[in-house]
Amino acid sequence: MALILTQEHIERMQAHAAQAYPHEGCGLLVGTFAPETEEKSLVKLVLLENAWAADVAAALAERGQPQAAAMTKARRYWIDPQELLATQRQAREDGLSIIGVYHSHPNAEAVPSECDRELAWSTYSYIIVSIRNGIAVDLQNWQLDNNHQFQPEPMKIAPASAARDRMPLLSS
């Protein structure tokens, strides 16, 4: 499995994560999945506000995640379900799918936490941006394996201009 994205996508995630610092930044990866080649192609990056709040923490604590009660936006992110549904709806209209999630780890490694693993979905790509003192220093991509453990997922950097800069062929 591999995720294809552009340098522009990476730069936008890094900038968004740096802007969110000292909190975690987050967003959705929208694109296509080609089962025959086992490649996901990122088409659109949807940058979101971290919706983590006391009521989210309390609800998760009641559902068996007691550590959630003590977490803040500096250690957790939450995607508003309404924004998730709106993004999913728009993606479908565009013939695309949500193929993953991106978030940042302020002053921490770009390695999934146990909280990340507990809430992850098996088919998604999970990009984590490490932010140190407000500056993006690392970016890693992960995917769950069959044992619900994160494994590195390769990224392929495609030229941003590959599709839009081609000149149409003219017929005489």
Image (spheres, helix red, strand yellow):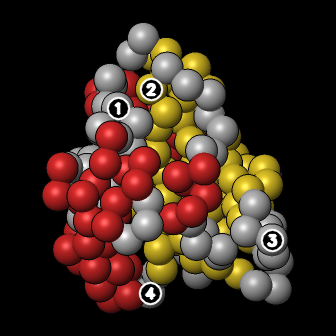
Looking at the image, tell me whether mark 3 or mark 1 is earlier in sequence order.
Answer: 1
Mark 1: amino acid: Ala
Is the C-beta separation of discs 4 and 3 under 8 Å? no
Give how far apart the Cα atoms at labels 2 and 4 are.
34 Å
Give how far apart the Cα atoms at labels 4 and 3 are.
31 Å
Give the residue at mark 3. 147
Image-quadrant location for residue 71: top left
Give how far apart the Cα atoms at labels 2 and 1 are.
7 Å
Give how far apart the Cα atoms at labels 3 and 1 are.
28 Å
Give the residue at mark 2. 106
Does residue 24 appear left or right of residue 129 in this picture? left
Q: Where is residue 91 in the image (x, y as percent from the top left)?
A: 37, 79
Mark 3: amino acid: Asn
For label 2, count other residues whose C-alpha is less than 10 Å away and answer few (under 14), some (14-19) or many (20+). many
Looking at the image, tell me whether mark 4 or mark 1 is earlier in sequence order.
Answer: 1
Residue sitting nearer the eye, 155 or 106: 106
**Quadrant placement of the C terminus:** bottom right
Q: Where is residue 134 in the image (x, y as percent from the top left)?
A: 39, 16
Does residue 100 appear left or right of residue 152 in this picture? left
Give the residue at mark 4. 95
Is the C-beta separation of discs 2 and 1 under 8 Å? yes
Q: Position of residue 64 (x, y in %)?
A: 43, 67
Q: At numbered mark 3, what does the secondary structure look like: helix, strand or loop? A: loop
Is any atom of residue 138 visible in this view? Answer: yes
Mark 4: amino acid: Gly
Circle 4 or circle 3, nearest the eye: 3
Mark 2: amino acid: Pro
Image-quadrant location for residue 42: bottom right
Looking at the image, tell me whether mark 2 or mark 1 is earlier in sequence order.
Answer: 1
Give the residue at mark 1. 74
